[in-house]
Image: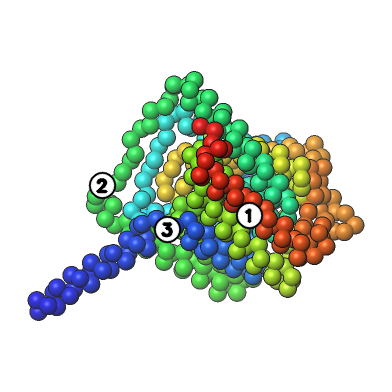
Amino acid sequence: MAMSGEGGRLWLAGFKTDYESIFVEDWSPYFGSVLLVMVIIGLMISGLFWGVFGGLKLWGDWFNTAIGLGTFVGVPEHLDGPFLHRLSLMNITLVIGAFCAALLSGKFFISRPPKLEYIWAALGGSFMGLGATFAGGCTTGGFFTPVMHSSPAGWAMWGGLLLGAVIGLKLLLWTLDHIEWGMTAPPVLKPSPGILSIYPLLGLGVFVGILVWSAQWYTSGDAKLTVRAVIILAGFAMGFIMHRSRLCFARAFREPFMTAEGEMTKAVILALAIAIPLASLLFQTKVIDPYIAIPAAFWTGSLIGGIIFGIGMIFAGGCASGSLWRMGEGHIKLWVAAFFFAWSGSTASGLLKQTGLLVKEVTLEEIEATKLGYQAYFPVMLDGWGWSLLVGGLFLLVWYALVRYNESTEKFTVL
């Protein structure tokens, strides 16, 4: 019996160790980036793509309609419900996935920022909404996904994001040197030990709820809900993965200039190095149309939008997807940033359409275009996949070399 009791204690100790290594200790961002790509490829095989801005814009459209500004800014009369719109649903379940991961890891806390940070959140979110409108997407839909889809629009936004991050950091540094009001952070609202002890059970409950929700829609017999069931699981998985690995596009662009740390940047580079050739196989076998996620913004809209978005994400403290998963772990600042991101995106999109800048036309080649750019696709521009993959690989190699050089020399830091 003594041996049995000792064996039970050892078994429980081993179980606790495994649980902590999986659900408590942070995952490597490289591991997280690979898992994220696998989820995205799964979406693409289902004929879907990953985007964030479209869902946030829908939330802003609903808000503008609710306060009576819908007609003024040109919001459509008919709007999809937040749970039926594909990108909105993906955003919602991404937040839930991060919330579940935060519960399982015991890291869900209500974190309130200093008073000044609320202003930065509103300002940063507004800039991100405007920038995403120009670029046709955020760091996800304007940079990451277009690069995956072999579009130079993604690389044009990449250049804008780098420049915007530098400008944003310099502006933020100036404010830290000249503004003293509202810089004291209130205490984090941590739960009691009793509440904290049931976090794992609450997280398990959230996970089971997601599975039940997805299964009900998948077996509903409704073709639209069947597709949405896949989105529920994909969005949840993305939020879970990004929280566990702390994967953040804003950090990938910010940290090299701020601290010379390049681990997150290299994780994003790894993700794209895997994703671009895998996506190309899907495009060549016509599993999915590459143009479905290429914004009509190359190159003017992508570059200008990237600069504006880059400044905004510095002040907000996160990009679009990064804001969502941090919302799931209790950061009030990111809830504020996401609100203004959504509102600004809706308002800017409507007003810019009224100016004619975002009015889309279809050329004889059936490529969408606006006054800010067009749908650019490397295999068409370079007459084949060989050169396209080579150019994409060279961009990644140059980015990696610059990041690695900066890690060793700190030549590009601005703080």
Q: Given this view, does label 1 or label 3 mark the residue nearer the observer?
A: 1
Mark 2 to mark 1 CA distance (whole Å): 48 Å
What residue is disc 3 on?
27
Picture residue at 56% right of the left edge, 58% below the top: 270
Sequence order check: which comes first, mark 2 or mark 1? 2
Q: Quadrant of the N terminus?
A: bottom left
* 405 vs 229: above or below: above
What residue is disc 1 on?
397
Picture residue at 46% right of the left edge, 64% below the top: 210
| Amino acid on which the number 2 mark rests in the picture | Ser
Q: Position of residue 106 (x, y in %)?
A: 33, 53
| Amino acid on which the number 1 mark rests in the picture | Leu
Q: Is residue 320 left or right of residue 19?
A: right
Quick one: which residue is furthest to the right in this view?
364
What residue is disc 2 on?
192
Instruction: Give the class, few, some or many, for how many residues have Cα within 10 Å of label 2's Cα (few <14, many ≥20).
Output: few
Picture residue at 36% right of the left edge, 57% below the top: 25
Q: Given this view, does label 3 or label 2 mark the residue nearer the observer?
A: 3
Q: Secondary structure at mark 2?
A: loop
Q: Position of residue 92 (x, y in %)?
A: 53, 54
When asked about the image quadrant of residue 122, the answer is: top right
When asked about the image quadrant of residue 63, the answer is: top right
Q: Position of residue 292 (x, y in %)?
A: 72, 60
Picture residue at 55% right of the left edge, 74% below the top: 219
Sequence order check: which comes first, mark 3 or mark 2? 3
